[in-house]
Amino acid sequence: MFSHVMVGVNDLEKSKQFYDAVLGALGVAPGVANKQRYFYRSPTGTFAISTPINGQAACHGNGSTVGFHIDSPEQGAAFHAAGLAHGGTPCEDAPGWRDGPTGKLYLAYLRDPDGNKLCVLHRPAAA
């Protein structure tokens, strides 16, 4: 359904350091520059960061979350730790297992340096 997801940032290079770290923990290569944007590509999609084209300040969407698939809770913990070490802030509950309507989920949430809410999600294989 989606070709890409892009979030606005105010300090492109600071945000690149943050996203290189958190997405690197998920096995994604560092961002590739294209004008005032960086693109992170994977076999399943593209994530991008950009300073706003209209010249206004970037702001996060209240109620918005960008979710990334992870293969294991350990990968989620690495994502969360990398984010905190690179200017991210914790939000929601601490990383860990939750009981959801479709079964157990491992979730870890944080906000990037501009306040964009991020989540990683792992669903264990059915037993």
Image (spheres, rainbow, N blue to C red):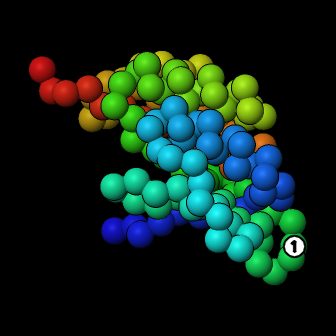
Q: Amino acid at mark 1?
A: Gln
**Which residue is more in the foreground, 16 or 88?**
16
Task: Give how far across and how far down residue 25 sits, in percent.
Answer: 51, 32
Q: Residue furthest left?
A: 127
Q: Secondary structure at mark 1?
A: loop
Residue 46 percent across, percent down from the top left: 47, 61
Q: Note whether residue 127 is visible.
A: yes
Q: Is residue 108 visible?
A: no
Query: Relative to 20, does residue 103 appear above or below in the rendering?
Result: above
Along the horizontal axis of the image, is 55 left or right of 42? right
Left or right for 64, reference 57: left
- Count residues near mark 1 (Cα–Cα under 10 Å), then give few for <14, some for 14-19, many for 20+: few
Placement of 104 over or under 87, stated as above or below:
above
Task: Decide if residue 69 is on the left or right side of residue 9.
Answer: left
The residue identified by callout 1 is 56
Say whether residue 115 is left or right of residue 74: right
Please name the residue shown 81% across and 80% down the image: 54
Place of residue 13 in the rendered image (x, y in percent of width and height, measured from the top left)? 78, 52
Does residue 61 lie above or below 108 as drawn? below
Identify the residue at image location x=34%, y=68%.
1
